[in-house]
C-alpha cells in the first residue's frame, strides 16, 4: 500500500511538503492547480497507507508525516542491494569453482594424451 | 531526443542498478542463471541454502525458489519470466512470498550479460517501486524523494 500511495507525483509532492512541517489542507493545496476536494482525496490515500496522520482539532486538522512506512520504503532498495551483492559474491565463487573443475578435467585429459 | 534522455534519467533514479564483472565466459554465466541446479548454488545471501528450486525458463514461465537462512527460517521467492534471450538478457518479475504463500510487492528485474573477451559484465536493474503495468509511466525522482525522506527521518529521530 505504501508503494501505490507513493506512485502518484502529487502525493509525493505533498509528502515532501510535510517533511518540512505539519500543514493544513489549504496550505497543501496552494502549490497545486487543484481543488480542495481533489487534495483531500490524495490525503485520504496517504492517511489510509499510514503515511500521514491528521490532527483531530475540528477547524485546522493539520496533516503530519508518519515516519515508519517511509523508512521501510527507503530500506527496500538497500535490502535488495545487499541481497544481490551477496548473491553475486557467491556466483563469482561458484563460477571460479566451475572453471577450476573444467580446467582440471582438461589438464587430466591432456596429461593422458601425453602418455602416448 | 531530450525527452528520451530525461526518461532514461528518470528510469535510473528509481531503479536499483548493480554491475559486476565475472571472470567467466558469458555462456557459463548465463547457464548459472538459467539451470535450476546451478542457480541453487549461489542465489541468496551468504550462508543461505536453496532447498527448493523450480524454474520454467521461457517467456511466461514461472519460478519458485526457497532459501533457508542459517537460523533455519525459510524464505520463498517467486516470479514470471518476461524475456529469455540466450545468452544476453533475462527479464523477470520478482516478489517475496508472505507466510501464506501470497506474493508481496512485485518488482521487475532485468539482467544483461555483456561479453568482454573471456569475462562477462553483468548488469542487474531492479525496478523496485513499480509493477509491470506501471513500467512505462514516467515519474521522476523516486530515489531522490526517498533519499530526502531518509535524511529527514534521520534528522528527526
Image (cartoon, coloured by chain):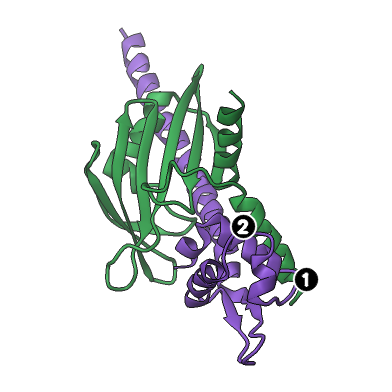
Kindly identify the residue that appears in the image at 29 percent across and 42 percent down.
B81
Q: Is residue B40 above or below residue A43?
A: above
Location of the C terminus of chain A by quadrant is top left
Q: What residue lies at 70% left-to-right and 76% top-to-bottom?
A: A23
Chain A visual colour: purple
- Which chain is disc 2 placed on? A
Q: Residues within 10 Å of mark 1 (few under 14, many from 20)?
A: few
Q: Quadrant of residue B90?
A: top left
Residue corresponding to mark 2: A33
* Place of residue B76 in the rendered image (x, y in percent of width and height, measured from the top left): 33, 62
Q: Secondary structure at mark 2?
A: loop
Find out whether the residues at labels 1 and 2 contact each other: C-beta distance under 8 Å: no
Q: How many numbered callouts?
A: 2
Rendered hue of chain B is green
- Pick the front one: A32 or B151: A32
Q: In terms of secondary structure, where does tag 1 sit?
A: helix
Which sits in the foreground, B136 or A93? B136
- Whether residue A102 is visible, yes or no, is no
Question: Left of B45 or right of it: where is A20?
Answer: right
Q: Which residue occupies the extreme bottom position in the image?
A: A57
* Residue that numbered label 1 is attached to: B155
Query: Is A51 left or right of B62, judged from the image as shown?
Result: right
In this rendering, the answer to whether A26 lies above or below A100 is: below
Above or below, B7 relative to B114: below
| Quarter of image, res A95 | top left
Task: Tell me the residue at 65%/78% (across/down).
Answer: A64
Amino acid at each position: 500500500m505504501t508503494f501505490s500511495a507513493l506512485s502518484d507525483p502529487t502525493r509525493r509532492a505533498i509528502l515532501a511538503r510535510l517533511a518540512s512541517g505539519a500543514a493544513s489542507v489549504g496550505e497543501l493545496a496552494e502549490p497545486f492547480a487543484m481543488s480542495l476536494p481533489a487534495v483531500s482525496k490524495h490525503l485520504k490515500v496517504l492517511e489510509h497507507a499510514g503515511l500521514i496522520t491528521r490532527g483531530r482539532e475540528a477547524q485546522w486538522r493539520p496533516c503530519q508525516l508518519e515516519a515508519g512506512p517511509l523508512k521501510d520504503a527507503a530500506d527496500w532498495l538497500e535490502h535488495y542491494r545487499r541481497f544481490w551483492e551477496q548473491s553475486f559474491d557467491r556466483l563469482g565463487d561458484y563460477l571460479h569453482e566451475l572453471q577450476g573443475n573444467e580446467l582440471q578435467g582438461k589438464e587430466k585429459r591432456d596429461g593422458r594424451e601425453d602418455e602416448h | 531526443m531530450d525527452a528520451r534522455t530525461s526518461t532514461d534519467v528518470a528510469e535510473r533514479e528509481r531503479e536499483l542498478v548493480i554491475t559486476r564483472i565475472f571472470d567467466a565466459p558469458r555462456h557459463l554465466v548465463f547457464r548459472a542463471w538459467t539451470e535450476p541446479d546451478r542457480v541453487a548454488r549461489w542465489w541468496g545471501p551468504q550462508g543461505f541454502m536453496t532447498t527448493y528450486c523450480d524454474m520454467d525458463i521461457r517467456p511466461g514461465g514461472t519460478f519458485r525458489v526457497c532459501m533457508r537462512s542459517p537460523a533455519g527460517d525459510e524464505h520463498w521467492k517467486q516470479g514470471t519470466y518476461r524475456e529469455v534471450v540466450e545468452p544476453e538478457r533475462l527479464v523477470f518479475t520478482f516478489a517475496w512470498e508472505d507466510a501464506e504463500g501470497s506474493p508481496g510487492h512485485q518488482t521487475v528485474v532485468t539482467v544483461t550479460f555483456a561479453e568482454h573477451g573471456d569475462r562477462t559484465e553483468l548488469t542487474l536493474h531492479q525496478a523496485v517501486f513499480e509493477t509491470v503495468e506501471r513500467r512505462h509511466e514516467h515519474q521522476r525522482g523516486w530515489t531522490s524523494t526517498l533519499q530526502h525522506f531518509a535524511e529527514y527521518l534521520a534528522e528527526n529521530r
